[in-house]
Image (cartoon, coloured by chain):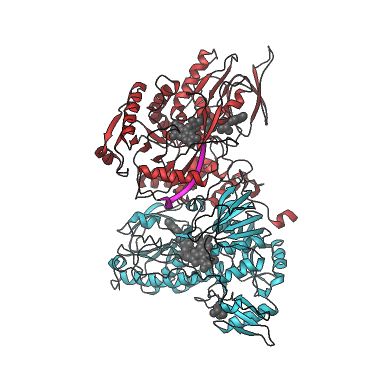
Amino acid sequence: MKNYDIVVIGGGPAGLAAAASAFENGCSSVLLIERDTKLGGILNQCIHNGFGLAHFGEELTGPEYAHRAMEELKEKAPGVDVLLDTFVMEITPEKKIYAMNKKDGYFEISAKAIILAMGCREKARGALAIPGTRPAGVMTAGLAQHYVNMDGFMVGRKVVILGSGDIGLIMARRMMLEGAKVLACIEIAPQPGGLARNITQCLEDYGIPLYLSQTITSIHGKERLTGITVSKVDSKYQVIPGTEWDIECDTLLLSCGLIPENELSRKAGVPIDPKTGGPFASEALETGISGIFACGNVLHVHDLADNVTKEAIKAGKAAALYVSGEAETTSKDAIENPKVFPGKVVKPLNESDDEKAEDENVRHMTCIICPRGCRLSVKLSEPPVVTGNGCPRGEEYAIAEVTHPMRTLTTTIRVRNEDGTLGRVSVKSNGEIPKEEIFNLASKVHHTIINAPVAVGDEVLPGVVATSGT
Amino acid sequence: MKYDIIIIGAGVIGTSIAYNLIPYDVSVLLLDKNNDVAMGSTRANSAIVHAGFDPKPGTLMAKLNVEGCALYEELCKNLSVPYKRCGSVVLAFSDEEKALLDELLDRGNKNGVPDLKILDQNEIRELEPCVSEEALAALYAPSAGIVSPWELCLAQAEVFVRNGGTFIGESEVTGISKNEEGADAKFTVTTNNGAFSADTVIMACGLRSDKVHEFVAEADFKIVPTRGEYFLLDKCEAVKANTVIFQCPNKDGKGILVSPTVHGNLICGPTAEVLEGDPEDTATTANMLAVVKEKAMKSVKNISWRDNIRNFSGVRANTNIDDFIIREIPDNKGIFEAAGIKSPGLASSPAIGRYMVGLLKEGGVSLPEKNGGYDMTRKTVHFRYMSNEERAELVAKDPAYGRIVCRCEGVTEGEIRDAINSPIPPKSLDAVKRRAGTGMGRCQGGFCGPRIVQMLLAKQGENATPLSILQDANGSNLFTSRDEEVES
Ligand SMILES: Cc1cc2nc3c(=O)[nH]c(=O)nc-3n(C[C@H](O)[C@H](O)[C@H](O)COP(=O)(O)OP(=O)(O)OC[C@H]3O[C@@H](n4cnc5c(N)ncnc54)[C@H](O)[C@@H]3O)c2cc1C
Ligand SMILES: Cc1cc2nc3c(=O)[nH]c(=O)nc-3n(C[C@H](O)[C@H](O)[C@H](O)COP(=O)(O)OP(=O)(O)OC[C@H]3O[C@@H](n4cnc5c(N)ncnc54)[C@H](O)[C@@H]3O)c2cc1C
Ligand code: SF4
């Protein structure tokens, strides 16, 4: 196997942008290794919209974002080699990479620099130590997302979500659109973990109750889940005895946090920050081992793919400078003066004083147009007056919301392949449609089978475009 | 169908008996009510191959434990089952407990346990640096070990089937009756999946051994189902136990232990709680898990509970009798039982299988020896334990081993394919897990699950439907149908 100056591990948005940036900054010998059979990382299963405003200046779904990032790599960095379906088994501080695939077997590559971009994984039930039985029907929200969006398998009918992280909120809406009933979202903290706009567009839109300061204290059912016990917790998250109540359900999705995937880094001896779960890093995103860089969710968990891309561009450039001997920081800085990553800003769900002053003629809402999630107030005068918006689009949104609320539908559609088998691609409504039309359109899409081939951007039904291709 | 011998119960005991019958020219049927082997106590226990200083001298338990322990190394090598002779220590935290160690040492010597030794504080520290400073002395038993119980059970069953034995699952025995004189077999075994007949019946039904006993005679013992709960922690550099760390036994049993597992994890438990209701209720409870935490930290101070991968529990088939019950049932010639096989049942199992064959012979069961032509060994690929050179060679030969499917444990597509095509084909995701070791790591199947589902569907062929995919036992369906599939 050929050796490379820079090897990037992981082909999600972080790896894609890092590889492109390393190439653009003068390194012509770059290899990108991805264990999946396609690039794009976790974004391939995030079929909802809300990505790309910052980086591409346009609202995109996850697969569209991944597609754009791949196009960018091809255009800007045509010389980057890509190995798909290839698993990196081990890396060493001397920057040897041991990897394996079906075609080349088990092989070794030497690199001058390595960029870690392995992403993150979800906290599973064990990490939460929820007592009770161990039936089928309990899984992480991201796993359910894979089954529902990628495989087209329905994971259950009566669903409870534990944790109000974004993946859980997104999956609550997704399950409703697929015909399930989502009975509750339960959060141990006194405020939701996900973005305010997801509380609005995933829970409130669908009438799903959010229970704060509560947690699940037991799981029931022998073979398949039959129900859960919920209890209130005090300010120290200790269960308050006597507050138990039961919910009958067949599915429990866990959305309780992400953990950077650092098995490879740890084995190589890369120092890990227990606070973020990712490597300590210098300003230039070099880890505690000289020449090993990190970006994206493997470094610290990001809320937004756009921020991942931004960080990865920086890491790619730093790695290129390192290889050409012009590095701006050293691995020592990672330990002695580590970069501090902004923690998650959780906004309490409290109403402002204004909102408490009840006024029938004023409506309050969260803007769902961009991740900032401004809290808006609309005075129902003629014309309506909007306050609280951070930009003009917020005003537009608020007025539409009180006159004719609009939403974008994202879901999947069945595709008949040339060989007769059924596959699936993700789709979205071509722009926003009236909110009350969402279920109708979803049902229409779900009852249709289209024929392959399908490309991103194809109109597959009137008013419905593909966001991934066959 | 008629067989020479029917074994009821495919736990580690039933399969050990089946395995030990391979050299004989008899037709053997192994029955279980579940959809796989190793679904009872055998899959949820501490996985310790006890050295044998615990049982009272002179009991069958003492004899079979020490014998069983001695058989492990070779058996597991022959069957390609993960096993490690890591030794065990029993810690004493007070002078009274130190006196108890002497008692255990004495018992162990009487039972024939090799190389027992009392360690002082320095020696403990040297052997096992993670042990609490407060431990004053320890009884060290170098012959103790750890094993993968369900893999041992499966391996025995697979080799049994490969040598011509029959395993039928999903068949709960509901009755055993004597046939009339002159019938072609002595007994009929009725199940919810048809009836089978045989001249000899062996019952190895774990928690249900009193119930099946009652199919033929009034039970002279009673199962006292006693549940034990556990934490299973991720591989972690900070706390690395080298040996099985026990505390002094007390009236509730062997107490809470901290031990490495053969897969490199740390296991802490079990509690002991008598179940009043369903003897197979393997739920965990907040109270008992708290007890495990508290007591485990007495032995090892800095256990990182954050690294918990899974909680589980198993139920011991304890009885009101202070020994194993292994015999031909009085006044029921031809019906044998291995009942109430509590701890150290796993450790004793290789010896119990042999012992049962001896009982059969004593009881006059015809066991003609085969004239060769059988193979008691099994080879499986454990990619994760191979050297880089071995891996390269294997992948070059068979590219299926070149794709990792389970990222936590490093299990390859080839190993999963082998599991799916094994002599007892897996009927669920957990059955694949028991065979290939997938989904055992920290993500608990979050990554490999969808890939294994696809492989199981591919195996089902044309009429494959996700609705048939099980997590574990029958009824544990993973998926429901989509609206459009119901309507169209
Ligand atoms: C289930 C889930 C849902 C999410 N939903 C959203 C969302 O809706 N919106 C949002 O903005 N963010 C979401 N996130 C966060 C999202 O992960 C980031 O926004 C972004 O995708 C992170 O990019 P990344 O490249 O760091 O990681 P990833 O996209 O996870 O990419 C990492 C890549 O590395 C590969 N890899 C890992 N280890 C190896 C190895 N040993 N060898 C070879 N390849 C390897 C993986 O296969 C993967 O393709 C979600 C995260 C998860 C886990
Ligand atoms: C918490 C705990 C910790 C333990 N720790 C250890 C240890 O560290 N070391 C050790 O040596 N031992 C240990 N043991 C004991 C050990 O696990 C058991 O002795 C051993 O697994 C018993 O095997 P078995 O085959 O008798 O029972 P099981 O594995 O329970 O098998 C019985 C089988 O019979 C089947 N069956 C029952 N009724 C019927 C029916 N009517 N029809 C058809 N099939 C039926 C069941 O489905 C089951 O598969 C522990 C046990 C527990 C619970
Ligand atoms: S008002 Fe503007 S800035 Fe604020 S959330 Fe809406 S779109 Fe974003």
Q: Nearer the viewer, residue A325 or B76?
A: B76
Residue that lies at the very extreme toward the right in this rendered image: B487
Q: For the image shown, how many numbered marks are present on the structure?
A: 0
Instruction: Return the x and y of residue A322 as percentages of the image width and height.
Output: 31, 70
Residue that lies at the very extreme toward the bottom in this rendered image: A383
**Is B33 positioned to the left or the right of B247 in the image?**
right
Instruction: Return the x and y of residue A316 as percentages of the image width and height.
Output: 39, 70
Colour used to depict chain A in the structure image:
cyan
Quadrant holding the N terminus of chain B = top right
The verdict on residue B87 being magenta is no
Asked whether the viewer can see residue B150, the reply is no
Q: Nearer the viewer, residue B151 or B146?
A: B146
**Is A115 positioned to the left or the right of B41 in the image?**
left
Asked whether the viewer can see residue B200, the reply is yes
Q: Nearer the viewer, residue A315 or A405?
A: A405
Q: Which chain is red?
A: B
Span of residues in magenta: B301-314
Instruction: Return the x and y of residue A465 as percentages of the image width and height.
Output: 64, 70
**Is A131 positioned to the left or the right of B487 in the image?**
left
Q: Nearer the viewer, residue B411 or A270?
A: A270
**Residue B279 found in image quarter:** top right
**Residue B483 found in image quarter:** bottom right
Up/down of B62 relative to B442, above or below = above
Up/down of A167 relative to B356, above or below = below
Up/down of A54 relative to A89, above or below = below
Instruction: Return the x and y of residue B409 as percentages of the image width and height.
Output: 44, 48
The verdict on residue B306 being magenta is yes
Quadrant holding the C terminus of chain B = bottom right
